[in-house]
Structure formats: structure tokens, C-alpha cells
Amino acid sequence: MKSHFVCVSVPPRWRQRKGCRARGGGRMECSWKTVLLLVCASLGVQYTAIRTLRDSLSGPCQGAYRCQTRHYRDSRWRALCDDSWVPVESPRKHILLFATTRSGSSFTGQLLNQHSGVFYVFEPLYHVQQAFTNSSTRLRRTLDRRALLGAYRDLLLNLYTCDLHFMENYIRPEPQDHVTSSFFRRSSSHALCSPPVCLEGGDGAASDQPDETWCPKKCGALNLTLASVSCLSRGHVAIKTVRVPEVRDLRTLSEDPRLDLKIIHLVRDPRAILASRMMAFSDQFRAWKIWNATGRQPRYVDLSQITSTCKDMAASVETGMQRPVWLRGRYLLVRYEDLALNPTEKATEIYKFVGLEMEDRVQMWIAKNTNTNLSSPSEWNYRYSTTRDSRATAESWRLRLGFDIVRAVQNLCNNTLALLGYKQVHSAAELRNLSHSLVEHRPQI
Ligand SMILES: *[C@@H]1O[C@H](CO)[C@@H](O)[C@H](O)[C@H]1NC(C)=O
Ligand SMILES: *[C@@H]1O[C@H](CO)[C@@H](O)[C@H](O)[C@H]1NC(C)=O
Ligand SMILES: *[C@@H]1O[C@H](CO)[C@@H](O)[C@H](O)[C@H]1NC(C)=O
Ligand SMILES: *[C@@H]1O[C@H](CO)[C@@H](O)[C@H](O)[C@H]1NC(C)=O
Ligand SMILES: *[C@@H]1O[C@H](CO)[C@@H](O)[C@H](O)[C@H]1NC(C)=O
Ligand SMILES: *[C@@H]1O[C@H](CO)[C@@H](O)[C@H](O)[C@H]1NC(C)=O
């Protein structure tokens, strides 16, 4: 028999670092006003209970997901405040799509979003970065990389345990009554646009919608409490991020006994990444575009971004290949080009790695989104579009970049290219000859 609980955990502003006091009978009771609202629905019966609990950002009281196993049904109250808590073997998967901007992560993320049991969040760290970027100059000056990465990890951990309220610390303008209209790329997530979060959104509604505004239009502002309920009822959480520089920065999450983290490291040919960034962010890449158009390198062109993209990508792959204990069984390297050329085969591999069944709807989504006609008018919302012919787009950079730029990137990223199995080109003719593949059969690792 299967039991199924849905729990809503406390909003972060109620959480304070206060301890629990032992009360009569040795049970732990919390001495402060924090209230945990748990709505647990079991076998169609809805329980509502209000309890006090000890909690802290890193304490063991976080994961309401414990409620999901039958074993914890009777002991769930105690477990939430119990110091002697031990990790439960949880069937809940915590999937991290670890990628970089314009590496095909929207497409890959959608593969996970299609699964009916997955609660998918598209780049939640955007809000953290925005909040930090907009803070005062003084704070910005003192803010170091570690602090930002720490904030990233806190948010990821809270999302994996389905505390969507934690986002309120970062979303601007600040949500009122746990409701916000500013959730970044909400439309990318089925769960955030379908029941119970949105009663209007029917099953599968998100996949065919061509723009980012349909969901807020149809569903209204996002109730983060309902989002937490949805998260818990889905069973698995998948998060896509492009803001964590290296896989090493995920070590504490990977070692966290509350999580069963699976990291899908998505990489792509840096030349393709650059071409895609030039198209998507043309303001930021104005100098590159001048370079591309004139064949002459402007003095002020910023080479540092693509250089660090390459360095971070290589460093993460090397870490993954060294198979440290904290990553063992938790790291899968995926080249976007392989996924684009053999979507079904690669998606099957990804699903096997994360330990989920590849549902028919995932298959159907792949069939629909990897064969569309590139020159047809479906070029809507180009920046973030995933509905493109994956095969054609994977190599289209070769027709979009001048040889001069390609050569420059090859020099900056030669080690990364070699490591990942991307061949260098030595002439413009070789660059444009698409029957000559630049993707080695497999990465050289
Ligand atoms: C950051 O500041 C800019 C300019 O003041 C503003 O347009 C933007 O909305 C702010 N972003 C956030 C997340 O507050
Ligand atoms: C958000 O959803 C919760 C749970 O259904 C509900 O209690 C609350 O009133 C909602 N908030 C608003 C502002 O509608
Ligand atoms: C793609 O679309 C264009 C314009 O809509 C059409 O002319 C062309 O025949 C289509 N190609 C394929 C392979 O369907
Ligand atoms: C680079 O220039 C070519 C023409 O030389 C153009 O077709 C292409 O779109 C440009 N690429 C980018 C990314 O702007
Ligand atoms: C990359 O370039 C550097 C400097 O030019 C060189 O030392 C290194 O051997 C090259 N790496 C590969 C894999 O070709
Ligand atoms: C393009 O590449 C293919 C495969 O490497 C090669 O056989 C062909 O001669 C090349 N075409 C040109 C025009 O260089």
C-alpha cells in the first residue's frame, strides 16, 4: 500500500536559529512562535496539523519530504524535531542540470520537465544573483565568491526540500502574502502552471505554449505555498542552473545526507556557445558582432567570459572523471551535440542515470521537438526557444561565425576542446563543410 503525504513547510521569515527545549516525556518541543503548517493528505484524507518545531537553515528539520514514506507517517512529528535523526532512504530524486548559458540547457531541462513526477525549476539562482547585484555598493564590495555560492547552495537545498518560500528572500519586488508575479521563467515549469498551483492549466498545457507570458496570464500571480504543495506531491525535484561555476562548488550539496543528488553536467562546444550568446545577447556582444562582420578584432572585445566558461567546463569535467567519493554515482557528463544527434538514446541514458522511468510523454515531447522545421515561422521567442530542430542547431554555429573568431576561440579553449572531443578547424572551408563533423565519437576522457 502506498501512502502519500503532502506537506507545507514554514515560510523562511518564521525560521530563526532557535533551539528546541526538552519537555516532559523527553519529547522535543519548540519554545518559540514558529509554526509549521503541515497539510498531509493520506489516502484521500486530509490532515491539518499545526506544530511548533525547531528549525534552522541547515538543521535536520528541513525536509518535509520525510512525510512521504509510510514509515514516517506515525513518527513524522517527532522526527521533525528529533536530534537523533538519521537519513532515510528516500525515493525522492534531486536532479541538478548543471550547465552554462547557451549550452542547450533549456532543451535538456525540458526533457526532465516532461516527466509527470518531476517538479522542475528553471534557474532559480537568477533571483539570488539579481538580489546581490542590486544590493548596495558596500555590500557588493565585501561580498566574495564564497558568500554568493553559499546563498546559491542554501536556495538549492531549500528547493530540493520543497520550501519555495525560501525564494522570497531573493525575489524582487518582495512577494506579498507568499504570492509573486516575478518568478523567473515560470512558464518553463509544468508544475508551476498546472494544478494545484494553477487550476486553469490543464495537464501538459505548458509544452505547446510559445511564449513566457501565457502562464502568468492564465494562472495569475504565483502562490508559493501552493508551489510547495505541488513540489511535495510530485515526488522529484529537478533544477536547472547556469550560475554555479564548477562542479566542486556543489560538493556540500552532494554530501548532504538529506539529498540524493544527481548531477547532469551538460557541456557544449564553446564555439557554439559563443555563437549562440552572440545571437541571444547582442547588446552585450556588440564588439564580437563587429569582429564577426568585419573580420577584424576590436581592441575592446572581452575575451574573459568565454575563457572562463572553457576553464570552468574543463575543471568540472576533470573533477567528474577523477570520480571523487562525493561524486561517485552522482555525476553524468552529457555533450549537447550527442543529445541533439541522438535525442532518444541520450534521454534514455539520462533517465536511467537519475533513476526515473522515461515516460511516454517524454518520448512524445522528443519526437515533437527534435524534428521541427527550422525555417518555418516557429522561430518565436528565439532567445529561449527549445522547439527547434536539435540536429540542425547543434552545428549551425559553423555557418554563423567568422573563421577569425573561431580561430581565436580555439586558441583560448584548445584544452577544453581536446578534452571534450571537439575538433579544431584550420580553414574557413573546413569550418563551413558540414559533412565534415567536428564532434569526435566520444570525449577523449
Ligand atoms: C535592479 O535594479 C534595476 C535598476 O535599478 C531594476 O531595473 C531591476 O528591476 C532591479 N532588479 C531587482 C531584481 O530588483
Ligand atoms: C495561497 O495558497 C494557500 C494554500 O492553498 C492559501 O491558504 C492562501 O490563502 C493562498 N494565498 C493567497 C494570497 O491567495
Ligand atoms: C520548412 O518550411 C519552409 C517554409 O515554411 C518550407 O518551404 C519547407 O519546405 C519546409 N521544409 C521541410 C523539410 O519541411
Ligand atoms: C556573422 O556574420 C555572418 C556574415 O558574415 C552572418 O551571417 C552571421 O549571422 C553573423 N553571426 C553572428 C552571430 O552575428
Ligand atoms: C593548448 O595551447 C597551449 C598554448 O599554446 C599549449 O601549451 C597546449 O599544449 C595546447 N593544448 C592542446 C591540448 O593542444
Ligand atoms: C567536406 O568534408 C568531407 C568529409 O571530410 C570531404 O570528403 C569533402 O571533400 C569536403 N568537401 C570540401 C568541399 O572540402
Image (cartoon, rainbow, N blue to C red):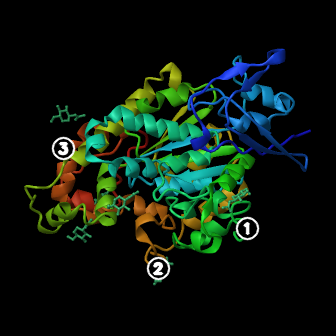
How far across and how far down the image is residue 124, in percent? 50, 50
Relative side of 256 to 138, left or right: right
Real-space Cα separation, disc 2 to disc 1, in angstroms: 33 Å
- Near-viewer residue (111 or 25): 25
Picture quadrant where residue 255 is located? top right
Within the displayed image, which quadrant is ligand 4 positioned in? bottom left
In this rendering, is residue 340 above or below 443?
A: below
Real-space Cα separation, disc 2 to disc 3, in angstroms: 36 Å
The structure residue drawn at horizontal position 16% and vertical position 69%, both measured from the top left corner, is 293
Q: Is mark 3 within 8 Å of ligand 5?
A: yes
Name the disc covering residue 376, or none.
Answer: 2
In this rendering, is residue 286 above or below 13?
A: below
Picture quadrant where residue 209 is located? bottom right
Q: Secondary structure at mark 2?
A: loop
How far across and how far down the image is residue 400, in percent? 28, 65
Q: Secondary structure at mark 1?
A: loop
- In the rendered image, the quadrant that contains the N terminus is top right
Name the disc covering residue 122, or none.
Answer: none
In this rendering, is residue 77 above or below 359?
A: above
Which numbered disc, 2 or 1, marks the residue closer to the eye?
1
Q: Which residue is mark 3?
A: 411
Viewer can see residue 276: yes
Residue neighbourhood size for the residue with mark 1, other residues' Cα within 10 Å, grouped as few (<14), some (14–19), many (≥20): few
Amino acid type at mark 3: Asn
How far across and how far down the image is residue 286, in percent? 20, 64
Q: Which residue is mark 1?
A: 199
